[in-house]
Image (cartoon, rainbow, N blue to C red):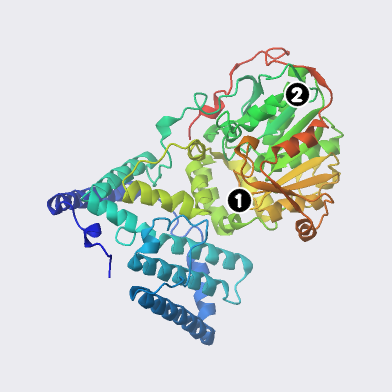
């Protein structure tokens, strides 16, 4: 019943396998010992996310309606009965359609044995049925408040993902085959990888997603030529060398997020947005944020405005003589840009001419799954950690984002690195993703409390920056607003809310894919698609109903929009042409500071 070929799942050398099992047992003891030593004396809260309280309330609600629980159990039994019948018929030689199949995006069950081998097919389908039942049952519990329901749903999914049969040696056919073929050497190699990751992460598991030795910032990633022409405590300003004889008169400033490093926009020459923009004739300036330590704990969101885009504007004027600039804000960099534009509007400062927002939230009333990590208990826990250290460690931020896509960004590497015993593939995007940054204490707490918890940026006068009440409705310059159809960090429905908040014309564009690929999609790749609605209604459902799909990258559409707002062509401006003396070559030193 297990397989039609008994030789497929047999040991090639039982004696060697036994030796490796002894090695595995000894190494496992060492891993546990080292882990316990590192945990000794730590003062981590027992339940920093309040899971115990949330699941206790869930249990109470479920037990209060036993009829509904019986109905749910009967539904599960019916599903299993259908699966047992289907499997039995298949074992007797009949072709049967599966009772349940994984989603197309689910890469856990790609190995052919999950389909061809009857036992593993049964394991896969029984897991999928149980996972579906568990998540559906939790979601249908009545009486939970919205935040508790979201927390329970999110962590139920984390549990379900962790229990996938693909994550265990005996129930993953690919791992089992490799274990038998190599006499367990894959598990020995996997334990070595696990030890190395624990050593690198010190008091936490730091899963290696790529070959870190294969990349160098400024060597084979972040290689567009340019100079650092200005710097302060919070940022370096990069001025990129022109690639055309003439350029648009208005310079272009890019404000990236400081949660990650800016070179996501300049990974390789063939997918670099910065290089592409330079080649289109834009004079490109980019803010490279510092990777802060405890000395910058006091820096605030307001400081990021004053020492970020506003200082950059002064430097750009000295470098080019221009007082009118176009600007891009990406993610939290866009949130800062929105606050800055409102501040400038109140002050009568018109130096920004047109603004582009990449996957930016300014109304946080529906922020997506990140809301799960931001409640009173977790804010208090973060405050305690940051009070002691002066910052939030980049690894904690990375773990949060990775949990949003746990199967792709956690469990796939557990299987590859620890069960299959393989080294991760060199991948520039995952290198960037692992190159984490810290968050200054005062800025980060302000951002979480005032944006995510209180949603004050969306309220006229809700925030005050440098003594000026902030009102997004006073922003009247033209805006290009980009969202991503599959964005799990800044959901497009949340991004779209800005359309009703800004006081000027807004062109909303919906790109295919998620938080990164929706932005980094060069035209030459011919991937994904984007949607536009020529009428630009301010109601999202109306916008979606009238949206027209366009194949490929949205970059040319954005270029067409911005070029009309960039003025006439003038002779190209090199980084050394202005009043500011270059400090060092791009990408600068700030971006190379590790966490």
What residue sits right under mark 1 in the picture?
A: 489
**Residue 547 showing in the rendered view:** yes
- Picture residue at 46% right of the left edge, 54% below the top: 107
Query: How many numbered marks, from 0 up?
Result: 2
- Percent of width and height locating residue 91: 34, 74
- In percent of the image, x 38 and y 45: which residue is there? 203
Question: Which badge, 1 or 2, comes first in the chain's sequence?
Answer: 2
Q: Position of residue 113 (x, y in %)?
A: 36, 60
For marks 1 and 2, give the CA distance: 32 Å
Q: Secondary structure at mark 1?
A: loop
**CB atoms of marks 1 and 2 within 8 Å:** no
Q: Is residue 23 above or below residue 97?
A: above
Quarter of the picture containing the N terminus is bottom left
21 on left or right of 331: left
Residue under label 2, please give it.
314
Q: Crowdedness of circle 1 by 10 Å Cα count: few (<14), some, many (20+)?
A: many
């Amino acid at each position: 019943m297990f397989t039609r070929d008994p030789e497929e799942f047999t040991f090639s050398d039982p004696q060697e396998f036994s030796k490796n099992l002894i090695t595995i047992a000894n190494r496992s003891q060492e891993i546990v010992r080292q882990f316990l030593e590192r945990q000794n004396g730590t003062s981590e809260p027992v339940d920093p996310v309040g899971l115990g309280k949330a699941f206790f309330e869930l249990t109470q609600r479920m037990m209060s309606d036993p009829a509904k629980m019986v109905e749910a159990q009967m539904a599960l039994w019916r599903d299993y009965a259908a699966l047992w019948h289907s499997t039995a018929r298949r074992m007797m030689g009949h072709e049967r359609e599966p009772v349940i199949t994984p989603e197309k995006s689910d890469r856990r069950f790609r190995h052919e044995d999950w389909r061809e081998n009857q036992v593993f097919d049964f394991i896969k389908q029984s897991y999928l049925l149980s996972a579906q039942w568990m998540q559906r049952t939790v979601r249908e519990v009545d009486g939970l408040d919205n935040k508790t329901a979201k927390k329970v749903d999110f962590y139920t999914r984390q549990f379900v993902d962790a229990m996938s049969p693909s994550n265990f040696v005996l129930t993953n056919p690919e791992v089992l085959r490799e274990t038998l073929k190599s006499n367990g050497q894959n598990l020995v190699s996997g334990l070595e990888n696990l030890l190395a990751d624990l050593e690198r992460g010190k008091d936490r598991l730091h899963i290696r997603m790529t070959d870190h030795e294969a990349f160098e910032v400024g060597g084979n990633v972040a290689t567009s030529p340019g100079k650092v022409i200005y710097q302060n405590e919070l940022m370096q300003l990069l001025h990129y060398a022109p690639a055309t004889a003439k350029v648009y008169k208005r310079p272009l400033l890019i404000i990236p997020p400081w949660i990650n490093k800016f070179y996501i926009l300049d990974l390789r020459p063939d997918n670099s947005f910065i290089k592409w923009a330079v080649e289109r004739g834009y004079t490109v300036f980019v803010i490279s944020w510092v990777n802060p330590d405890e000395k910058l704990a006091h820096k605030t969101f307001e400081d990021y405005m004053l020492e970020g885009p506003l200082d950059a504007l002064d430097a750009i004027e000295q470098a080019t003589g221009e007082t009118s600039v176009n600007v891009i804000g990406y993610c939290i960099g866009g949130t800062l840009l929105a606050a800055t534009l409102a501040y400038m509007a109140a002050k009568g400062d018109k130096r920004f001419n047109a603004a582009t927002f990449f996957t930016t939230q300014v109304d946080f009333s529906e922020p997506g799954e990140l809301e799960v990590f931001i409640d009173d208990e977790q804010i208090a826990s973060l405050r305690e950690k940051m009070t002691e250290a002066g910052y939030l460690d980049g690894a904690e931020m990375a773990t949060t984002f990775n949990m949003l896509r746990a199967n792709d960004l956690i469990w796939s590497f557990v299987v590859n690195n620890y069960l299959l015993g393989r080294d991760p593939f060199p991948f520039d995007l995952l290198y960037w993703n692992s190159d984490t940054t810290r968050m200054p204490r005062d800025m980060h707490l302000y951002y979480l409390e005032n944006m995510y918890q209180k949603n004050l940026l969306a309220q006229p006068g809700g925030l005050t920056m440098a003594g000026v009440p902030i009102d997004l409705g006073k922003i009247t310059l033209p805006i290009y607003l980009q969202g991503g159809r599959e964005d799990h960090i800044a959901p497009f429905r949340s991004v779209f809310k800005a359309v009703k908040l800004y006081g000027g014309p807004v062109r909303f564009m919906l790109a295919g894919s998620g938080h990164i690929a929706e932005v980094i999609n060069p035209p030459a790749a011919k991937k994904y698609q984007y949607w536009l609605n020529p009428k630009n209604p301010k109601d999202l459902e109306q916008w979606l109903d009238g949206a027209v799909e366009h194949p490929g990258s949205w970059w040319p559409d954005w270029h067409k929009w911005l070029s009309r707002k960039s003025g006439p062509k003038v002779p190209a401006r090199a980084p050394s042409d202005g009043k500011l003396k270059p400090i060092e070559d791009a990408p600068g030193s700030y971006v190379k500071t590790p966490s």
